[in-house]
Image (spheres, helix red, strand yellow):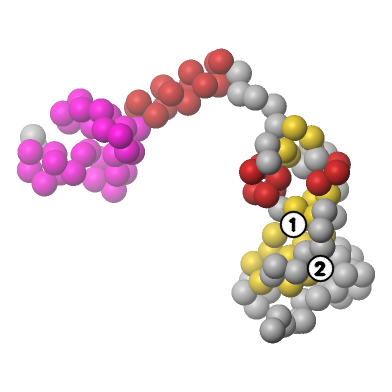
């Protein structure tokens, strides 16, 4: 079923870190994304293991959940800066219309303007 190509729980073959195959990590070890989904961050803990997949071309580092700390909430200034950036990136410089998506950098303006609306 699963290949054991990268299975090295003792960390002998792969840089001293316990290494597991895709979807074979033990309970209690999480990736950054899995921790973030629970509102946690690894903090300053060391890497506890790794997962290799796609013939060893991809790697995900694993962290212990019991050592993870809660994420800090964004400050009001950070949220204001993010909203300002969103407005700047979703407003067409040609027609000054704000859209619900980022204006494609490839064109530099909204699709209506690029296709001949106000050019």
> Residue at (26%, 33%) from the top-left corner?
99
Q: In front here: 39 or 105?
A: 39
Task: Specify which label sits upstream in the sequence, 2 or 1.
Answer: 2
Compared to residue 16, the image places residue 116 above or below, namely: above
Q: Secondary structure at mark 2?
A: strand
Q: Main secondary structure of the magenta part?
A: loop
Q: Position of residue 88 (x, y in %)?
A: 34, 27
Q: Position of residue 86 (x, y in %)?
A: 39, 29
Q: Position of residue 81 (x, y in %)?
A: 48, 21
* Camera sees residue 32: yes
Q: Position of residue 13 (x, y in %)?
A: 86, 75
Residue 93 part of the magenta segment? yes
Q: In front here: 51 or 113?
A: 51
Range shown magenta? 89-117
> Residue at (79%, 35%) from the top-left corner?
69
> Residue at (65%, 78%) from the top-left corner?
55
Residue to which mark 1 is pinned = 61
| Quarter that holds the C terminus | top left
Q: Could you say which disc has been placed on residue 19 in the image? A: 2
């Amino acid at each position: 079923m699963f290949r054991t190509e990268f299975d090295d729980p003792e960390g002998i073959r792969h840089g001293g870190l316990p290494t597991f195959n895709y979807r074979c990590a033990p309970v209690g070890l999480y990736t950054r994304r899995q921790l973030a989904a629970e509102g946690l961050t690894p903090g300053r803990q060391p890497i506890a293991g790794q997962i290799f997949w796609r013939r060893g071309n991809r790697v995900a580092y694993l962290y212990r959940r019991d050592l993870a700390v809660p994420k800090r909430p964004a400050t009001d200034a950070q949220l204001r800066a993010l909203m300002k950036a969103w407005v700047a990136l979703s407003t067409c410089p040609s027609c000054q219309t704000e859209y619900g998506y980022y204006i494609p950098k490839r064109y530099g303006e909204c699709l209506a303007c690029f296709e001949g609306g106000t050019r």
